[in-house]
Image (cartoon, rainbow, N blue to C red):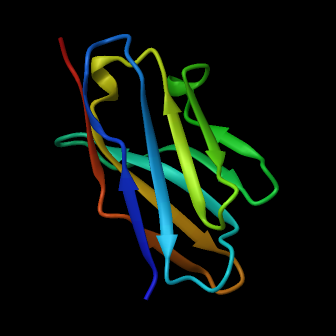
Amino acid sequence: QVQLVESGGGLVQPGGSLRLSCAASGSIFRFNTMGWYRQAPEKQRELVALITSGGTTNYTDSVKGRFTISRGNAKNTVYLQMNSLKPEDSAVYYCNALHSPTGSRYWGQGTQVTISS
């Protein structure tokens, strides 16, 4: 059974930084695309950033220049470096992974990120 496990969330002051990590276990294949989504209270889940197996990245406009997504050397790991954090970045952040040949998509359990002074 495939599981995605996130870590690295927490409480930081505005302008601070956090690094989220996500590692997949139980997978025998390499995910084509991995990414991060977030969901704030009473809002829809939104895409934050994604990265393909070829290294192509895509970011939502509100995080461009502040967040960086990367894949680790270990198979099926992904990171999100978040700098210059703002209160509006506060949300539960979810790791997501897609295996295109089978259309299988997986979600992590989420990690809370809170930006507050």
Name the residue furthest right: 54
Q: Is residue 75 left or right of residue 22?
A: right
Seen from the viewer's position, the closer of residues 36 and 60 is 36
Residue sitting at x 57%, y 53%? 78
Which residue is most to the front?
74
Q: Nearer the viewer, residue 30 or 60?
A: 30
- The x, y position of residue 101, in whole percent, is 72, 83
Rendered location of residue 1, percent (x, y)? 43, 89
Q: Give the quadrant of residue 53.
A: bottom right
Q: Is residue 76 above or below residue 116?
A: below
Relative depth, front residue between 8 and 82 = 8
Assign the C terminus to one quadrant of the image: top left
- Residue beneath the point at 27% across and 31% down: 90
Report the number of discs.
Answer: 0
83 to 97, vertically: above or below: above
Task: Please name the residue shown 48% across and 49% down the image.
Answer: 36
* Location of residue 85 (image quadrant): top left
Measuring from the top left, give residue 116's x and y in whole percent: 19, 18
Q: Residue at x 67, y 82 (%)?
A: 29
